[in-house]
Image: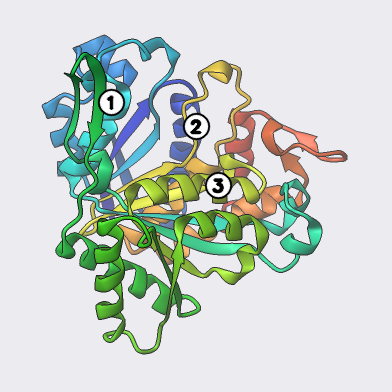
Amino acid sequence: MTKNIAVIRGDGIGPEIIEQAIKVLQKIGSIYGHTFIFTDVDMGGCAIDKWGDPLPDFMLEKCIQSDSVLLGAVGGNKWNDVPGYMRPEKGLLRLRSGMGVYSNNRPARIWPQLADNSPLRKSIVDKGIDFIIVRELIGGIYFGDHRTEDIDGIATATDVLMYNEEEIRRIGRIGFETARKRNKRLCSVEKSNVLDSSRLWKKVMHELASEYPDVELSDMLVDNCAMQIVKNPAQFDVIVTENMFGDILSDEASMITGSIGMIPSSSLGAGTLGLYEPIHGSAPDIAGLDIANPIGTILSAAMMLRFSFDMDKEADAIEKAVSNFLDKGYRTADIMSQGMVEVGCSAAGKLISEELK
């Protein structure tokens, strides 16, 4: 099977971690008889420097025409002072919208080898941490009207949070379908005691529930959910929520698993074209030092194989290789602990590749 993968190396540690994921995918291709064609795409700060645009239209078109997109990370202090419409993150928002990927799925799973890395008490961790946050990705306050104006001599900024029932319904279905494939428990998170958009969200979710009688639906206010994630994460199976809430909660969830460097994500729409990326940032302070953790990116590549290419056994092989790597005591700097063997970014990629059989 031949697949064309658009590769966005991006900024900071992005090129380093992407290189390790490509190394793993090439090994998978040689073992299972697949051909992966990698097409480089400029996005983020590097695109601003080269093209004067965080995502030129012709680069976006390369992504849309690919079978899927693998992204490292974008942004950095170098571009903090550019105008808002030119920031590297604007390229990412444009990419998500252009690809039509409205559902971001972020697993929060603690690997048993890293249980001691969690900041939570052992008694909490021992109950298990294994849930998924399904985040609506191309609506809400990030895509609403934004303006800054002078009102009566006072600088005033406005950001509009808006959802319609169809946007809620389509992400709600993803939440229910995901829960149906897991433990059949879905928690809908909103702020319905304050926001009209959340009251509509809750109404639509309960309408959908009648179509999924096998899934247990619960509601939770976002502030309570933020507390419950650190108090009792074992209660969650699948969480579905709007864009901004999902952005915040998924970052919180990643930290209780021991390291943000271990967490992959997938973003999908109506078809199989997906955007796959680790959830961490570009970490410019460690760029070029060969100490970044590439595992989140490697696991993102595994998600690509599973969800966009229907290559379950290949995805399983990558996840098993990562587990074997950890079993043998290898650790990158962010997950290093006493008695383990510290390795750099490129060595981690090489060792995980060697675990593939």
Q: Secondary structure at mark 2?
A: helix
Residue 253 x, y percent position in the rendering: 56, 51
Residue 42 x, y percent position in the rendering: 27, 24
Q: CA distance from mark 1 to mark 2?
A: 16 Å
- What amino acid type is highlighted by mark number 1? Met
Nearer the observer, 352 or 13: 13
Disc nearer the start of the sequence (2/3): 2
Disc nearer the start of the sequence (1/2): 2
Whether residue 357 appears in this view of the structure is no
Q: CA distance from mark 2 to mark 3?
A: 22 Å
The residue at the point 24 percent across, 58 percent down is: 272
Tell me which corner region of the image, top left, top right, bottom left or bottom right, holds residue 286. top right
The residue at the point 25 percent across, 11 percent down is: 50
Q: Which mark is residue 43?
A: 1
Numbered disc in front, either 2 or 3: 3
Q: Secondary structure at mark 3?
A: helix
The residue at the point 28 percent across, 55 percent down is: 268
Quarter of the image with the N terminus in it:
bottom left
Query: Crowding at label 3, few (<14), some or many (≥20) Cα neighbours within 10 Å?
Result: some
